[in-house]
Image (cartoon, helix red, strand yellow):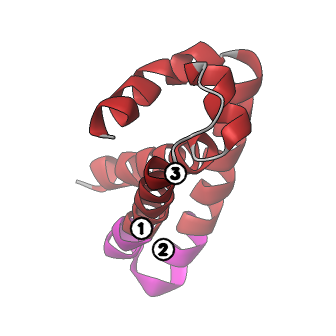
């Protein structure tokens, strides 16, 4: 159970930051080819991204309690943000399936 929760915290952090990055026109253009992310979709991506980051906090607090869980969450935020930066820099095509899912939702 402990391993599943830490993987959930890491996944929520990575996906949250990936959605926040996709809500920006620069990354949307690079990954989807469309000039601008539609405003409605950008709002949905931002809300979903922040919701995933908060869900990661909930999972970290559930796993380790308030004292150490908040530290774990802050660390996984850093790791998740850095992983998204590395993905967008060297392997942006890895995020194209996420773009396709987002386009279908819009």
Q: Nearer the viewer, mark 1 or mark 3?
A: 3
The answer to which of marks 1 and 3 sits earlier in the sequence is: 3
Residue depicted at 54% across the width and 76% down the height: 70
Query: Which residue is at the front of the view, 7 or 64?
Result: 7
Asked whether 105 falls inside the magenta stretch, the response is no
Q: CA distance from mark 1 to mark 3?
A: 27 Å
Range covered by the magenta-colored residues: 57-72
Badge 2 density bin: few <14, some 14–19, many ≥20, Cα 10 Å:
some
In the rendered structure, the answer to whether residue 4 lies left or right of residue 10 reads: left
Circles 2, 1 touching at the beta carbon (< 8 Å): yes
Query: Which residue is at the front of the view, 48 or 81?
Result: 48
Indicate the quadrant where residue 33 lies: top right
Badge 1 density bin: few <14, some 14–19, many ≥20, Cα 10 Å:
many
Residue depicted at 56% across the width and 40% down the height: 37
The vertical placement of 32 against 47, above or below, is: above
The answer to which of marks 2 and 1 sits earlier in the sequence is: 1
Viewport quadrant of the C terminus: top left
Where residue 98 appears, as percent x and y from the top left, is 42, 29
In the rendered structure, the answer to whether residue 106 lies left or right of residue 36 reads: left
Task: Say which residue label 2 marks.
Answer: 69
Q: Dot 3: what SS?
A: helix
Where residue 64 appears, as percent x and y from the top left, is 40, 73
Task: Say which residue label 1 marks.
Answer: 60
The vertical placement of 101 against 21, above or below, is: above
């Amino acid at each position: 159970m402990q391993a599943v929760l830490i993987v959930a915290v890491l996944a929520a952090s990575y996906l949250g930051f990936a959605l926040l990055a996709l809500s920006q026109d620069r990354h949307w253009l690079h990954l989807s080819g469309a000039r601008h992310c539609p405003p409605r979709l950008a709002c949905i991506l931002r809300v979903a991204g922040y919701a995933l980051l908060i869900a990661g906090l909930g999972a970290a607090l559930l796993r380790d309690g308030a004292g150490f869980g908040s530290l774990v969450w802050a660390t996984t935020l850093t790791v998740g943000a850095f992983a998204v930066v590395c993905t967008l820099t060297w392997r942006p095509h890895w995020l194209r399936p996420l773009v396709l899912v987002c386009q279908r939702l819009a």
